[in-house]
């Protein structure tokens, strides 16, 4: 007999389908309702699904009988995982693009989820495997399942189970995953990396000792790909000591002059913050201020770089990084060895980690 399970329903936000971070509901859910745990026949593994992309490229799946299943390993309660559900079977992980927030109230850690793949599209975003629907704009390889009818037709909740523990990944395993690319089983897994130190070694970067990456748009309502509309902050910390920046924290950093040394991707605008033009540019950025996603660079003992990327909308965006972890950026003294736990992703050939919460990075004793 199928088991009826109580589950909490979340308030959801109607958000646009795009790859940018947006505000996400991270409060407590509302009313409870019943659902019946499914037990569907599984006809494909996640690895087989990804192999279809490796063979054919972007593909709308025509087989209505194709069903995959996996345990939920992601939790968007903190707001750092956004409109994605990561499920894992014995062969790997796939990100299912569900265009709602507060997914943690419907899909619990360790719960089995079945996905009816017929009619869905398998693709990738800068190297990261994703399962969604066709993007009508053609801008991305996949788009979001963004209404409850469509979601319930394809994403079926099964029985609850024990959460999947994080996998300890070595530097050699990470290097092999980066070399293999899209089909490697590590991408999307909940992992723990140990012996991390702040900053990326020069041999792994074009800049000398990269520590941070922030992308600012001068006017977000204009072409975001235009070189004259983008400001890059890299190589040093620029005084940023938080995992990311809420809007208010960003304004605090901006007004303190932290980003005055940043440069545009257009070489003709290298002095965008100088006395002649800087006030105008800075004021425009201030008027259009929003929460800022931030990547902090770490390295493993052999030098492999890892970006810890945090949404400006995460609950812990403004949390200060332990000074012992940062070390002395100006003196370039290494910080303390630490471990970090999160969802491992790949972005344009680089390893990225999305933390579960502010307690996901610990100094090693």
Image (cartoon, rainbow, N blue to C red):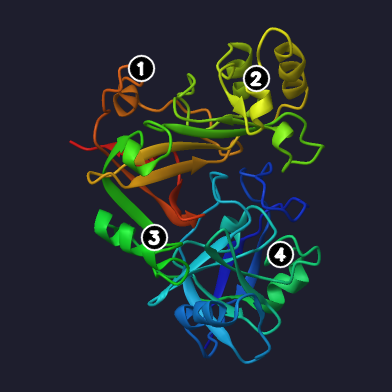
Q: Secondary structure at mark 4?
A: loop
Label 1 or label 4, whichever comes before in sequence order:
4
Seen in the picture, residue 333 relative to 305 is either above or below; the reply is above
Label 2 or label 4, whichever comes before in sequence order:
4
Seen in the picture, residue 10 relative to 44 is either above or below; the reply is above
Q: Secondary structure at mark 2?
A: helix
Instruction: Tell which tag, 3 or 4, sits nearer the viewer.
Output: 3
- The quarter of the picture where the C terminus appears is top left
Residue drawn at (82%, 37%) of the image: 221
Work out whether residue 7 or residue 89 is closer to the camera in this orientation and state it. 89
Q: How many marks?
A: 4
Contact (Cβ within 8 Å) of mark 2 with mark 4:
no
Q: Count neighbours of disc 3 (C-alpha within 10 A) and say few if under 14, some if 14 to 19, many if 20 or more.
A: many
Residue at the spot of label 3:
178
Residue at the spot of label 1:
330
Q: Count neighbours of disc 4 (C-alpha within 10 A) and say few if under 14, some if 14 to 19, many if 20 or more.
A: many
Q: Secondary structure at mark 1?
A: loop
| Mark 3 to mark 1 CA distance (whole Å) | 30 Å
Residue that lies at the very extreme toward the top in this rendered image: 275
Return the x and y of residue 357 as percentages of the image width and height: 45, 42
| Mark 2 to mark 1 CA distance (whole Å) | 23 Å
Q: Quadrant of residue 5?
A: bottom right
Q: Count neighbours of disc 1 (C-alpha within 10 A) and say few if under 14, some if 14 to 19, many if 20 or more.
A: few
| Mark 3 to mark 4 CA distance (whole Å) | 25 Å
Instruction: Tell which tag, 1 or 4, sits nearer the viewer.
Output: 1
Residue drawn at (48%, 83%) of the image: 48
Residue at the spot of label 4:
143
């Amino acid at each position: 007999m199928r088991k009826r399970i109580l589950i909490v329903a979340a308030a959801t936000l109607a958000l646009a389908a795009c790859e940018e971070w947006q505000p996400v509901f991270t409060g407590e859910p509302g009313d409870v309702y019943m659902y019946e745990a499914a037990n569907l026949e599984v006809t494909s593994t996640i690895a087989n699904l990804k192999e279809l992309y490796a063979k054919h490229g972007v593909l709308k799946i025509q087989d209505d009988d194709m069903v995959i299943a996996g345990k939920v390993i992601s939790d968007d309660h903190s707001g750092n995982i956004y409109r994605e559900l990561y499920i894992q079977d014995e062969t790997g992980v796939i990100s299912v693009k569900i265009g709602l927030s507060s997914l943690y109230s419907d899909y619990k850690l360790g719960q089995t989820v079945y996905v009816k793949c017929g009619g869905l599209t398998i693709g990738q975003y800068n190297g990261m495997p994703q399962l969604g629907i066709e993007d009508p704009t053609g801008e991305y390889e996949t788009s979001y399942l963004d209404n409850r009818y469509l979601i319930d037709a394809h994403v079926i909740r099964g029985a609850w189970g024990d959460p999947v523990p994080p996998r300890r990944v070595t530097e050699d395993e990470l290097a092999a995953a980066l070399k293999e690319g899209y089909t490697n089983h590590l991408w999307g897994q909940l992992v723990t990396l140990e012996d991390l130190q702040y900053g990326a070694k020069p041999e792994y970067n074009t800049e000398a000792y990269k520590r941070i990456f922030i992308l600012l748009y001068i006017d977000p309502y204009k072409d975001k790909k235009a070189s004259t509309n983008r400001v890059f902050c890299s190589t040093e910390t620029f005084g940023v000591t938080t995992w990311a920046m809420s809007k208010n924290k960003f304004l605090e950093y901006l007004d303190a002059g932290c980003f005055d040394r940043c440069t545009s991707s257009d070489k003709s605008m290298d002095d965008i913050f100088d006395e002649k033009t800087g006030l105008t540019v800075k004021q425009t950025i201030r008027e259009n201020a929003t929460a800022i996603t931030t990547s902090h660079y770490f390295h493993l003992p052999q030098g492999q770089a890892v970006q810890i990327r945090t949404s400006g909308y995460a609950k812990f965006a403004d949390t200060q990084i332990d000074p012992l972890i940062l070390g002395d950026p100006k003196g370039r003294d290494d910080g303390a060895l630490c471990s970090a736990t999160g969802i491992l992703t790949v972005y344009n050939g680089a390893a990225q980690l999305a933390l579960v919460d502010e307690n996901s990075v610990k100094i090693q004793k």
